[in-house]
Image: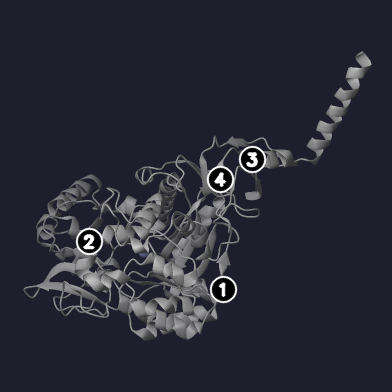
Amino acid sequence: MKFKTIIPLVISLLFILSCTNNMKKADLILLNGNIYTVDSEFSKVEAFAVKDGRIIKTGSNTEIQNEFYSELIIDADNKTVYPGFIDAHCHFTGYGLNLITSVDLSGTSSFDEVIQLLKNHNNKHEPTWLLGRGWDQNDWEIKDFPTNKELNILFPDKPVLITRIDGHAALANDFALKLSGISNDEKVEGGEFVQINNKLSGLLIDNAIDKVKKFIPENDNKTIEKALLLAQSNCFKVGLTSVADAGLEYNEIQVIDSLQKKGSLQMRIYAMLSPTEENFRNYIDNGIYITDKLSVRSIKLYADGALGSRGARLLEDYSDDAGNTGLFLHKPEYYNEVCSLAFKNNYQVNTHAIGDAAVRRMLNIYSKFLGGKNNKRWRIEHSQVVNPDDFKLFGQYSIIPSVQATHATSDMYWAEDRLGKERIKGAYAYHDLLEQNGWIPNGTDFPIENINPVYTFFAAVFRKDLDFFPENGFQTENALSRKEALRSISIWAAKANFEESIKGSLETGKFADFVIMDTDLMTAHEKDIPNAKIIATYIGGKKVY
Ligand SMILES: [Zn+2]
């Protein structure tokens, strides 16, 4: 009797041992997830295993548990899991620097409020330059552009520069203008020093801003480090694991690279170069630079200004400003020269173009280099107002429209004033743009918009602001489906950076960058989406939030 029970026990023990021997060790196993892999089939799984920072298998709980064991098991408790979100166009470093060095003027309801915030900041921090960012006269009771009159009275011997929300207009006080050597009859190509009664009003448009900005003392590396770490901690909270930083200086990229190598900066960064001699010499001339965390293989250019400040270059006059078509920032030769350098060195070109004339100009310049369908993935950042005749060029030359869905819902209150009833139909036309190549990357342009990728998803799908206005959505014929919107902030954003083989979906061999969320964006009621919260964020299988 005793003998009989021992035999099956030995057999089952041997069976268990042989299983354990065949089982592979993983660094992390996630079970019981409602997991959207965002692979080409948009398939869902329950579990995956991670080793050395990458996903080694996805499948059902049983499949994963039969093949792997790990000391670290996450029970996702049926919560939703997505690939880590990717912002295809933002100003990550600038956002961090703003938080540290300048007053947040966004959401102010009057110029008086702006003044009050500046006074408070000045009393508290006594900065050498008093800087602010984020005001929008469209939010004020008096919607005219401000003048520097009050700034001159309050700050007669301290330079003040406060930038509009879109970065394409700024107000400087007289002291800042004097310090920058700006004379009363100053002119600049691709910009304007606005005058009232033959005197400078302090309002600067586009390239005029740089004439003052260049006198602001450069941020030292310590400040940049602090800014990056602050930006990353805020971004992890909203589930971002990769960002494309649209326009960086050489020293900023150096700081990023060294912090990533030290391990304190874990955010993955796609660095678009500002077109400076220093960047050309150190990066473009030496080819593409890629680590696990950093990609340097693209240049960021600007074709025009922004719609809000009427700097975007239109084919016809602004509907609310006869005789004004906005501004081109440089001559065509400039773009030819930089594009040619990029083409030779296999760099991607990403040009900011908002007005239909600027978009058309860049489509034409790009197409001369690209020749037809190609895999260069040259991008037009924003692609905001597109003439109906020009949509097809994106497809014919495989040019990637890189869009920001929240721009549609931030601008919808006044965009029709600028563009008129007809022209607005070709604006914020994300679905029409998606159809050209079959994919489209989405971002925020933060700090112009909020950093939260869920807002991007919500705006893309519902075309409403966070107060659910307008009731039926803004130009919903150009809404994206939920699937398309999710892809636009994951796999398509990765593809816009040539990174679709290492990130953007949860598949074997890719980085284990993922988020656990309290809401299923694919099925949740519209009203619940803006409040969706991240429970945890992982980069390379390591918890970062
Ligand atoms: Zn931008």
Kind of residue at disc 4? Ile
Q: Residue tagged by mark 2?
A: 161
Compared to 455, does 47 lie above or below? Answer: above
Query: Looking at the rendering, which quadrant does residue 181 occupy?
Result: bottom left
Residue 35: mark: 4
Residue 69, x across and y down, in percent: 71, 38
Kind of residue at disc 3? Ile
Q: Residue tagged by mark 3?
A: 29
Q: Earlier in the sequence, mark 3 or mark 1?
A: 3
- Secondary structure at badge 3 equals strand
Q: Residue tagged by mark 1?
A: 287
Do the residues under discs 2 and 4 have CB atoms within 8 angstroms? no
**Which image quarter holds the N terminus?**
top right
Circle 4 Cα neighbour tier, 10 Å, few/some/many (<14 / 14–19 / ≥20): many
Kind of residue at disc 2? Leu
Residue 175, x across and y down, in percent: 16, 64
